[in-house]
Image: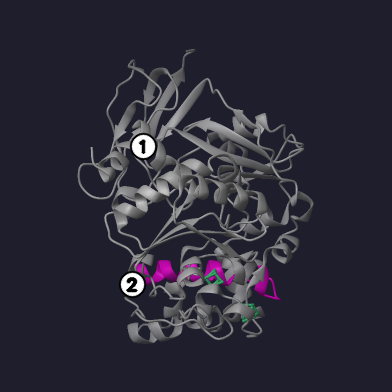
Amino acid sequence: MEFLEKIQQAGVVGAGGAGFPTHVKLKARARWLILNAAECEPLIETDKFLCRNFADRIVAAAAVTAAHLGAEHTVIAIKGKYEAEIRALQAAIDAAGQSIEICKMSTFYPAGDEQTMVQWVTGRSVPERGLPLDVEAVVDNVGTMLTIYDAITEGSGVSMKYLSVVGEVPHPVMIHAPIGTPITQCIAAAKPLLKEYAVIVGGPMMGKVLADPQQIQQAVVTKTTGNLLVLPRDHYLITRAGRPMERLALQAKTACIQCRMCTDLCPRFQIGHDVQPHLVMRNLYREQQTENSEEWVRAFGSAANCCSCGICEMFACPMGLSPRKVNEYIKGRMRERGIQVPRNQHPEARDSLNLRRVPTERLIARLDLSRYDGLHASDDCLEIHPDRIFVPFSQHIGKPAQPVCKVGDTVQKGQLVAAAAADGLSANIHCGVHGVVTELTDGGIWIAAKEG
Ligand code: SF4
Ligand code: SF4
């Protein structure tokens, strides 16, 4: 079986982002293969753990992927302060005799943003709303590399996931769980310090906030879950996430002092994209009255280039306003109105780029997370054996997978249980336990695990 076919069969998707199917991303030729090991968001431990413990597999998968792409440069981009991880990766590179460069980044947020990373490594800015491939680069997370390794060496489908549990736990822990495991079971294994808690699935800047106990009970580990941040329910990050859009809009109209800190610290603005949240905030008062599409683009078009990194609202704004959420709202309105915003295909980084990086430690302090920082996960990893899993059909960008099993079927660990949709972007889904299918819903498959 060919390289891409093995990856497609295994249902490999981007482990560090939104779950773009990897066999589609790698259907390309590129000069640069960049492995993202920067662990973009504060507190997360997963990529560091993978680099320390599976460096040889990551390097082996990188070599095969680079050969497939015809890449002239293979680079692992990682924060320079991750010394143990760099040592492990360098030892694996030397042992394999591969020509892979380790690029040491400074400790800022969002170092792991794909476009920020491409600019740092290659010196070229990706076009607005473009892809790294537009500047001859492919970026893959180290977790994705590990699943590529399993796919090409053992033919294994993606059915298990490594993730960290951090925050209100005695120590950050690493978890290895079947996809579909309830997140409450992962948190219980980490011995949470609170009986009642909220969870951010992912990192504190871009993760999904779950404050409602029912939502927390229903959430499961998916192919893209890399971290669970356990927090008190009244933590700033949780209460802030619950503010309704009407209130945020009213605050924007009445309290924005037009200091433009949101724009000046915006990482996409700094790599040359037209992202100017201060202008969107200034114009918000006339959103309802503006009918003309060209006028809309002039007043609000820059919101289209926002990547929702959150720097503007979680770090930059001295007034505690929410330019990110306003941009997201405006993007929705532009979709409704069918407004197309022109794209700059040749952006160039601004001279101020290196002066406007947001140091991760200062960001952590601003987010009121300092007490959880610096407590690294050990290399022990807790294996989770759930009694029951729920495997969602949609864990990737594109169309949901279609079930290929029925209620009452016995399924084996690693077995295909939902096949990629026949047309369009989609991905196969495999089972992480031995068990019996107990229920099929519109959203996924319930499987009761059996011993053995
Ligand atoms: S969230 Fe804010 S800082 Fe981030 S890209 Fe959007 S406007 Fe820029
Ligand atoms: S940083 Fe805040 S106050 Fe300043 S321009 Fe942006 S939204 Fe307005």
Q: Residues within 10 Å of mark 2 (few under 14, many from 20)?
A: few
Left-right relation of 94 to 371: left
Relative to 407, residue 275 above or below? below
Q: Secondary structure at mark 1?
A: helix
Relative to 387, residue 346 above or below? below
Residue 219 in view: no
Q: Residue furthest top?
A: 451
Magenta part mainly helix, strand or loop? helix
Indicate the amino acid at tag 1. Ala
**Residue at image location 74% in from the left, 52% down from the top:** 373
Which residue position is annotated with label 1? 151
Which residue position is annotated with label 2? 337
Q: Which residues are magenta?
A: 315-337
Left-right relation of 279 to 409: right
- Residue 284 drawn at (x, y percent): 52, 79
User: Which dot marks residue 379?
Assistant: none
- Residue 192 drawn at (x, y percent): 72, 35
Cα distance, mark 2 to mark 1? 43 Å
